[in-house]
Image (cartoon, rainbow, N blue to C red):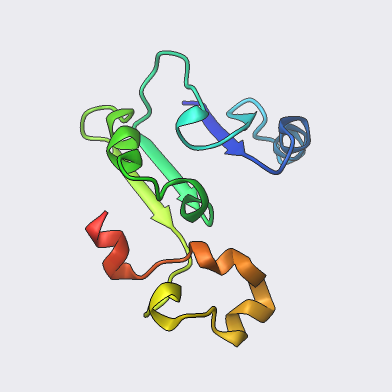
């Protein structure tokens, strides 16, 4: 099995060098891009995993069903993303303790309720 590691911000060449140095370069294909733009050339993956990224590209209506459609039957989608107990729109601002750490990026964070609705 080959894993495709896609990242918008890290050039594929840089990621490939890290994978090669770790001894897994033959099992991990680095790709620049993310989400549905990352093609697995006619093969449907069994798992899709997103760590600290989905909140930036996966919130458009209809995106999650589209992504799930790319999985093999019985495949699994795993998402780990920061969340808040109350949304920024509900609060009217990004809480100062969060804004100090991540800045305006937190506008993309949502509540567990919001994610379940998706």
Q: Which is nearer the eye, 22 or 98?
A: 98
Q: Position of residue 32 (x, y in %)?
A: 65, 32
The foreground one among 69 and 86 is: 86
Q: Residue at x 75, y 40 (%)?
A: 18
67 to 109, vertically: above or below: above
The image shows a total of numbered marks equal to: 0
Quarter assignment of residue 87:
bottom left
Work out which residue is located at the far top of the displayed protein and give it.
42
Q: Is residue 4 above or below residue 61?
A: above
Vertical order, 93 against 15 (above or below)? below
Taking depth in this image into account, of 98 and 29 the one nearest to the observer is: 98
Q: Is residue 71 above or below residue 88?
A: above
Left of 54 or right of it: where is 14?
A: right
Image coordinates for residue 104, horizontal then vertical, percent: 62, 68
Residue at left 47%, top 21%? Answer: 40
Residue 91, given in percent of the width and then of the height, sits at 43, 82
> Residue 67: x percent and y percent?
35, 35
* Side (left or right) of 80 relative to 52: left
At horizontal 48% and vertical 37% (from top left) the residue drawn is 35
Q: Nearer the viewer, residue 25 or 41?
A: 41
- Tell me which corner region of the image, top left, top right, bottom left or bottom right, holds residue 75: top left
């Amino acid at each position: 099995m080959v894993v495709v590691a896609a990242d918008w911000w890290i050039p594929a060449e840089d990621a490939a060098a890290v994978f090669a140095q770790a001894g897994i370069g033959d099992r991990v294909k680095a790709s620049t891009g993310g989400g549905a733009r990352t093609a697995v050339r006619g093969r449907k993956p069994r798992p899709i995993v997103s760590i600290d990224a989905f909140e930036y590209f996966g919130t458009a209506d209809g995106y999650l069903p589209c992504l799930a459609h790319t999985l093999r039957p019985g495949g699994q989608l795993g998402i780990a993303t920061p969340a808040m107990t109350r949304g920024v729109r509900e609060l009217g601002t990004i809480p100062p303790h969060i804004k100090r750490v991540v800045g305006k990026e937190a506008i993309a964070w949502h509540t567990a309720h919001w994610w379940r609705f998706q």
